[in-house]
Amino acid sequence: MSYEPSPAIWSRRDFLSRIGVAGVAGASVLGEVGGPQALWAQAKPVDLTSLRFLCLDPAEFETLVGLRQRVTPARKEPRTPVFEPQVGQFDSLRVFNHGTVLHDQNRFRMWYGAMGQPDAARPWWEWLRAGYAESEDGIQWRRVAVTPDGSHIVPDLPHTCCVYKDELAADPAYRYLALHFANSGEQRQLAESGQYDPKADFISGHLWTSADGIRWQKEASRVRFVGDKPLSFVPQCFFRDLQAADPARRWKAYGFSSLTLRSRAGIYAYSADGRTWTVPASNPILKPVERGAPKDSTGPAQHIHDTVVWRYSGYYLAFYQYLYGPDQADVELAVSRDGEHFTFVAPGEKVIARGGPGEWDRGEILPTVPVIVGDEVWLYYGASDYYHPSDGPFDRKRADTSRVCAGLARLPLGRFAYFEPQANATESYLMTRSIRLPGTAPLKLIVNAACGPGDSLTIEVQTAAGMPLAGYARKDCVPIAGDSSRHVVTWRTSGEQIRPAEQPLKVRFDFRGAARLYGFTWLPATDG
């Protein structure tokens, strides 16, 4: 849902020089990798202290030959939508118009942005509300009353429902947090009442705090911009980053920014305390021009809308909404090692795709931070039923009053993207960069891969100079077959164990048939 202030109040700001940086050339943009000289020359900082690698960023590997990168599409829950608007209530038109789901204390908890019939007498942000619901299984949801009068409207919580549970909060009153900064329309209201200077280098907002996620208090917050200030920054997730080496970046927030009246992008801010935030000049982190222009020329130019980021296994994974036409967008994937410099993963491949003709989610998909349940990643999403036909006029009123429900899609844990052989490739292999394994205790190599009948992966450990390590050559490897996220690599003469050497090592993966490699990790040989 897109609303902007009048251009008469806000002047158009030209950010094209900041978002027009060319992307990684050739194969990386197309998701195709090949050729004997397929070295990823655009060097990036790679965390080689990590012992886990996922097939997300080609720049983390030295050589990729005869391979293509694919994104794993999330499998939608057959019983979707899992949560729908309720006739006659404040959420009679839209639920999960942005929101948060937590798996918290043996239950699923949902804070969701909700909308009833529009109130033309007031701006939209004044009649959207935050609702609350719970579920035992994450599929069958019930609205829960949170006020003495039986309402399930969460008092004072912003409709963006950007909620985070801080497990390390020293004060229980700060266990649950929510964050919101004034959008462009709210800034205009504040400016007209003399409470805000549009020329300031910051945008004001609030941090909400709660002990139970139901009763909230708020305190002042603000976000300052280093360099040019866009029209807005709408945080859609934030969290305490335990891996941050810089104390000033212990908290990170991600969302979207209105760069101009017709251009949005993914943006990032950091904070030392969760109250005072800074948007560094490295923004936007997801540059629409680098991703590629929308296919539908009738849509706003260069447009990435919702952006949520979460930590997993040494990576920052971003699910972002990419616009193809007016109110037609689905969810794609980007990745980072430092939380600030992101790479698009196989652009054009969908994590959550719009539904087909006549389906409830055929309009647009709104991503949220996922929930890990067992060996699965559960992605709750909002979706609208409005579809703009390419050969017909765009109905703005119909789009803004479309029905939005909540859906659920699932991914296998750790299987976000993979490499597989290109069609007709004469050979297909992957070579890692040099990795220095820590310590002296023996390790074993665990591979996440799917191999069908006739498919296999063969692994060779090499010196940094590219010579096979004695006992760990391809001819010594027992080929990996079958489908498992925990294949243990075995060499016929050396077994499973690899002793770290003083010199860095490389690992080569040779693909046969239609084998898929999702990632690999090193574990102590004593681990089960």
Image (spheres, helix red, strand yellow):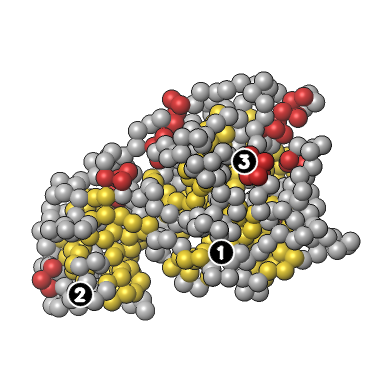
Residue 214 visible? The answer is no
Which residue is located at x 76 percent, y 30 percent?
Answer: 189
User: Where is residue 315 drawn, in percent x and y?
Assistant: 42, 54
Q: As displayed, is residue 441 above or below residue 101? A: below
- Disc 3 marks a residue whose amino acid type is Asp
Residue 59 visible? The answer is yes
Q: As displayed, is residue 412 above or below residue 527? A: above
Instruction: Report the Cα–Cα distance between label 3 and label 2.
Output: 52 Å
Q: Quick one: 203 or 24, which is closer to the camera?
A: 24
- Disc 2 marks a residue whose amino acid type is Gly
Q: Which mark is residue 395?
A: 3
Residue on which the image places disc 1: 408
Residue on which the image places disc 2: 454
Quadrant of the frame with the N terminus: top right
Q: As displayed, is residue 371 above or below residue 44? A: below
Left or right, residue 164 beside residue 157: left
Which residue is located at x 59 percent, y 59 percent?
Answer: 360
Do tag 1 and tag 2 residues touch (Cβ < 8 Å)?
A: no
